[in-house]
Image (cartoon, grey):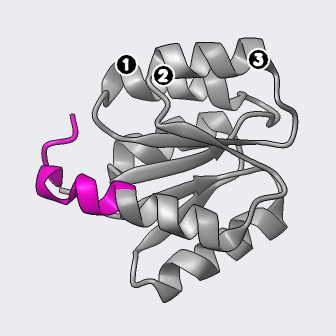
Amino acid sequence: MVSCDILIVDDQPGIRSLLKMVFVEEGYRVATATNGLEAVEKTSKLLPRLIIMDIRMPVMDGVTALKNIKTLYPRIPVILMTAYADAIQLGKAKELGAEGCIYKPFDVDNIRKRVLEIMDHNSEEVGNLA
């Protein structure tokens, strides 16, 4: 059973708050996490339909968290965010199954549009994410 629609993972409280506000206004149930380890734990408990996750975070970075999440839940789409475009990390993220990358600072309308496309595309798969 899906307990939230979107899990937002970022060590910056302002980014978490902004994205949560944007997607709650769109009618989604939103949870947040402050690092990759917390994201892996919350993914197991909440089974979100989509994860939006920063790459550079303390405790566990986004690429490592992506690897752990995709091992357990390969069908949950994950969008990564970064302010530091590292071609090696981005290449590894793509190999691991990241849905894409959003560069910070981001345009809220662009991220909203991307998320809505993914959510619409995956709406028939709710409940079959594992």
Sequence-wise first label, 3 or 2: 2
Res 54 quadrant in image: top right
Quadrant in which the N terminus appears: bottom left
Res 112 quadrant in image: bottom right
Q: Are marks 1 and 2 in contact (CB under 8 Å)?
A: yes
The outermost residue toward the bottom is 25
Res 86 quadrant in image: top right
> Residue type at mark 3?
Ala
- From the image, tell me which residue sits under label 2: 68
Q: Is residue 95 above or below residue 90?
A: above
> Residue type at mark 2?
Asn
> Residue type at mark 1?
Thr
Label 3 to label 2: alpha-carbon separation? 21 Å
Report the front residue among 42 and 8.
8
Measuring 25% from the left and 54% from the top, which residue is drawn there?
121
- Give the residues drawn in magenta, as a range: 118-130
